[in-house]
Amino acid sequence: MASVTIEGRVVSEIGPGLLVLLGVAANDTVADADYLAGKIAGLRIFEDADGKMNRSLADVGGAVLAVSQFTLYGDVRRGKRPSFDAAARSELAHELYEDFVAQIRQRGLCCQTGQFQAMMSVSLVNQGPVTILLDTSKLF
């Protein structure tokens, strides 16, 4: 379960599924957004009858809540104030965010969204908890 609230009003929410905090890097492309959509749609991270992580979003009837999150590219290796130089400019980030959402939907999954560049309050119930990092550069 996850939701996005803006100015005290819930604008998006999902039941079981995945909250995706999507950071777009300055060098990301449509191919990166499509790769992530395919990877997320196919992740087998939901429990099967034996309690093993073996089921995908489609298998469990789950949804995606996609929230643009440029602060994922905050670099604090130097000093105490984050640098966001590695984050994509707004126009590119918005384009790739929208492409990601479209790709999730084309795979037959329900995809709700936050509001690009809005000040949002994001809430989630993180079961397990399970948190997975995905990187198109495959650094981790």
Image (cartoon, rainbow, N blue to C red):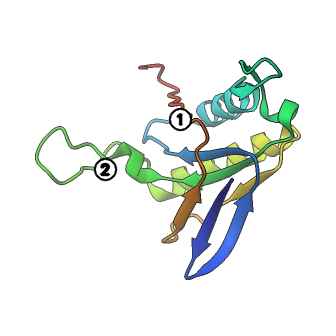
What's the amino acid at mark 2? Answer: Phe
Answer few, some or many: residues within 10 Å of disc 2's Cα (few below 14, many 20 plus, some between 14 and 19).
Answer: some
Q: Which mark is residue 84?
A: 2
In the image, residue 51 above or below residue 25: above
Q: Secondary structure at mark 1?
A: loop
Residue 130 on image: x %, y %: 56, 34
Relative to 6, 34 lies left or right: right
SS for callout 2 = loop
The tally of labels here is: 2
The front one of 17 and 79 is 17
Camera-nearest residue between 15 and 111: 15
- Against 8, residue 27 (above or below) is above
* Image location (x, y in percent) of residue 56: 78, 28
Looking at the image, the residue that sits furthest to the front is 50
Are dots 1 and 2 in contact, CB under 8 Å? no
Q: Is residue 138 visible?
A: yes
Front-most of residues 5 and 130: 130
**66 sits to left or right of 106:** left
Q: Residue 86 lies in what quarter of the image?
A: top left
Q: Which amino acid type corresponds to the residue marked 1 in the rendered image?
A: Thr
Residue 114 seen in render: no
Quadrant in the rendering for residue 46? top right
Coordinates of residue 33 in the picture (x, y in percent): 63, 37
Q: Residues within 10 Å of mark 1 (few under 14, many from 20)?
A: few
Q: CA distance from mark 1 to mark 2?
A: 23 Å
| In the image, farthest residue toward the left | 79
Q: Position of residue 60 (x, y in %)?
A: 84, 35
What number is the disc on residue 131? Answer: 1
Taking the image as shown, residue 69 lies to the left or right of residue 80, namely right
* Residue displayed at 53% across by 50% down: 92
